[in-house]
């Protein structure tokens, strides 16, 4: 087995500075106490206690000693209390945290709101909002931010300032920023995540992606250590220990490559102890006593067993595997679905094929997993699919850097961004929780990792649809399609694997300046094939219907001699054009506007006027219509004369 230790594991700048300040004070003979644990590492805090450095809960407990403010910082009210008590104070607040205090302590006015991304129970976050002078809110993640924004619809009107806990997960910060920008476009965003935290998380993720197992070393109350554990767990089985004493040989059975990282508050000596202990575990021969004890074990890590469900609880399932051990399956080892309930998946009496994860002979328990055994079988399916080219089905469970993860047959398959969608411009987030079909491009049986392609399936499906389309297409055939894109000269329509174009002249019987006046991207439209070019794979489509032809409507409803109301649409030197119905205009010659002689049409008419006219001539071939106001005036005069 090979062991690789992350380069950035261990003390960060802020932690190292705080610890060194305490040791300097001890060497100087100062009587000191720390306001809370100087860092989140119980071993170092215990070591300081042995040197007489007590961690106190409030300044009142200082009893005249010099107070050291820990690396997480404290609220402004605590500084005020220390001053009021007349205590001597040494500020070991991390400079990166102090920078956040300066940002939030500004007066942003009555409409200002400081948003703090982080863990509301963490002392660093409590110190940050303790410096706010106005309204503030703490949100843990993007989902909590969205919920907050829904409850505060007036948020876009406020002056919003966003900061982050220095140890916040980098990916979660990106999600928070993205969600906030959708609603508050003018938000003032300060990326206050410590650069060391970012490097540590990136390095841990990179290391976890290439080893069989990870060890994360750090205090159980350390926020940044917890985030490292979460990040590594997404890529490989991960063990979290505070010291080397917690390492168990059975946790690393069958492991070929091991990675070690540590939180920012983990002393270097503890990291070295973990590394040495792992080396000893891997190289030392078992003693006769150890081998004898192993021979009495009724099961072992990695063994495949069959268990019968004896009871089902919300968070775990109890099983009988036929040994002296009490078997249990944590919900997380039963399924990858965080919303699933154990009671919906198994029932008492069910027989399950399982794999042993951990044996505890002292407590008489054995931890089992169903999903990992399913994954082993599922991986064989993946290997077969890679060889045969079979299309697999799965659900996108996570969007990660560079692509997405798809769960199929209990195995997570990585789909690179370049292989996840039809177009590189498509949003990967749209795939989240969606069922997809994909092919396996490559796999690594030893590491049980596979790379797939959704695009390959989409490409094959598109090709099949194209072939089917060209086999059946003919001029005049009607299709229902979706408008895919618009240009100045027409609209492109997806007919189901093949695109056709509606020229702008075919969109409307009336003259239009742009296709968007008739259709929009995404519209469902009914079209018919006007022309086909099989060699160039081009299809011309028709959209406007013959029955909607305004000249056909005119022919049905109007004839020479009809009197209609027409709207003046334009004026010329020789007359006025008036709209009879949309798409059909007629000419009122200047001589037909009035019984009296006029110099120009604008002396009598203006654009927009609605006038009564008589249709005096229709030429359907040339699409010309002659109209007359004068004829109506003459008719009215004759009727008046007859009446006398």
Image (cartoon, rainbow, N blue to C red):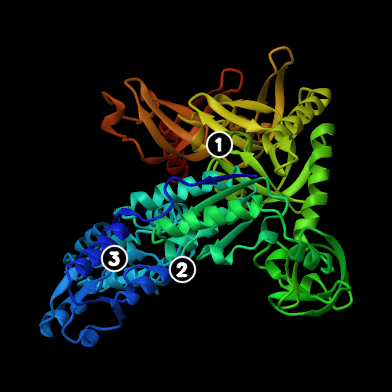
Under tag 1, what secondary structure? loop
Residue 533 vs residue 154, the one in the foreground: 154
Label located before the other in sequence (1 or 3): 3
**Residue 159 appears in the rendering:** no
Can you say whether 162 is above or below 639 in the image? below
Quarter of the image where one finds residue 288? bottom right
Instruction: Write down the residue under mark 2.
Output: 147
Please give the label number shown on residue 562: 1
Task: Report the Cα–Cα distance between label 1 and label 3.
Answer: 93 Å
Residue 365 vs residue 73, the one in the foreground: 365
Left or right side of 86 for 578:
right
- Quarter of the figure with the N terminus: top right
Left or right side of 83 for 334:
right
Can you say whether 488 is above or below 227 in the image? above
Please give the label number shown on residue 71: 3
Question: Residue placed farthest to the top in the image?
Answer: 535
Under tag 3, what secondary structure? loop
Can you say whether 353 is above or below 419 in the image? below
User: Residue at (85%, 78%) from the top-left corner?
Assistant: 348
User: Residue at (46%, 67%) from the top-left corner?
Assistant: 219
Give residue 131's position: percent from left, percent from top.
Answer: 22, 71
Task: Report the Cα–Cα distance between label 2 and label 1.
Answer: 65 Å
């Amino acid at each position: 087995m090979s062991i690789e230790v992350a380069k950035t594991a261990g003390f960060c700048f802020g932690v190292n500075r705080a610890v060194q300040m305490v040791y300097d004070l001890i060497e100087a003979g100062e009587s000191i106490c720390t306001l809370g644990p100087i860092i989140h590492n119980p071993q170092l805090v215990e070591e300081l206690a042995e040197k007489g450095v007590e961690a106190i809960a409030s300044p009142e407990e200082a009893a005249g000693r010099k107070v050291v403010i820990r690396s997480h910082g404290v609220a402004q009210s605590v500084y005020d209390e220390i001053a009021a008590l007349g205590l001597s104070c040494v500020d070991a607040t991390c400079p990166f945290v102090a920078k956040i205090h300066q940002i939030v302590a500004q007066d942003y006015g009555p409409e200002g709101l400081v948003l703090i991304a982080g863990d509301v129970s963490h002392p660093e976050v409590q110190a940050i909002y303790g410096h706010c002078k106005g309204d503030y809110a703490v949100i843990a993640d993007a989902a909590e931010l969205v919920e907050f924004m829904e409850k505060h619809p007036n948020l876009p009107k406020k002056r919003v300032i966003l900061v982050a806990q220095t140890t916040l997960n980098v990916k979660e910060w990106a999600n928070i920023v993205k969600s906030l920008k959708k609603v508050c476009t003018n938000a003032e965003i300060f990326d206050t995540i410590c650069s060391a935290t970012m490097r540590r998380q990136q390095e841990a993720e990179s290391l976890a992606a290439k080893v069989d197992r990870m060890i994360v070393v750090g205090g159980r109350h350390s926020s940044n250590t917890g985030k490292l554990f979460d990040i590594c767990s997404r890529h490989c089985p991960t063990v979290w220990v505070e010291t080397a004493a917690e390492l168990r040989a059975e946790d690393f059975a069958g492991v070929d490559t091991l990675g070690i990282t540590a939180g920012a508050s983990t002393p270097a000596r503890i990291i070295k102890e973990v590394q040495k202990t792992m080396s000893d575990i891997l190289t030392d021969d078992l003693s006769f006593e150890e081998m004898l004890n192993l021979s009495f074990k009724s099961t072992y890590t990695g063994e495949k067993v069959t268990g019968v469900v004896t009871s089902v609880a919300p968070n775990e399932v109890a099983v009988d595997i036929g040994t002296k051990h009490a078997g249990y399956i944590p919900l997380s080892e039963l399924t990858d679905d965080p919303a699933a309930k154990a009671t919906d998946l198994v029932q008492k009496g069910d027989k399950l094929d399982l794999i042993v994860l951990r044996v505890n002979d002292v407590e008489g328990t054995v931890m089992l997993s169903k999903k990992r055994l399913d994954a082993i079988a599922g991986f064989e399916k993946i290997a077969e699919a890679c060889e045969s080219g079979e299309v697999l089905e799965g659900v996108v469970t996570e969007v990660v850097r560079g692509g997405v993860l798809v769960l199929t047959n209990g195995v997570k398959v990585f789909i690179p961004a370049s292989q996840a969608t039809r177009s590189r411009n498509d949003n990967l987030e749209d795939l989240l929780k969606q069922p997809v079909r994909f092919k396996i491009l490559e796999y690594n049986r030893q590491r049980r990792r596979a790379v797939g392609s959704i695009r390959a399936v989409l490409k094959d499906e598109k090709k099949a649809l194209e072939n089917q389309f060209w086999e059946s297409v003919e001029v005049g055939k009607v299709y229902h399609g979706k408008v895919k894109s618009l240009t100045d000269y027409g609209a492109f329509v997806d007919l189901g694997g093949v695109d056709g174009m509606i020229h702008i002249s075919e969109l409307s019987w009336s003259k239009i300046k742009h296709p968007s006046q008739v259709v929009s991207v995404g519209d469902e439209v009914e079209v018919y094939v006007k022309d086909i070019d099989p060699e160039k794979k081009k299809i011309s489509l028709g959209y406007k219907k013959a029955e909607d032809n305004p000249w056909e409507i005119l022919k049905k409803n109007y004839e020479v001699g009809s009197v209609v109301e027409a709207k003046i649409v334009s004026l010329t030197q020789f007359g006025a054009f008036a709209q009879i119905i949309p798409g059909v205009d007629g000419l009122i010659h200047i001589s037909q506007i009035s019984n009296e002689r006029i110099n120009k049409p604008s002396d009598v008419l203006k654009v927009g006027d609605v006038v009564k006219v008589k249709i005096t001539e229709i030429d359907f071939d040339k699409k010309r219509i002659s109209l007359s106001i004068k004829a109506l005036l003459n008719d009215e005069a004759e009727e008046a004369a007859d009446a006398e």
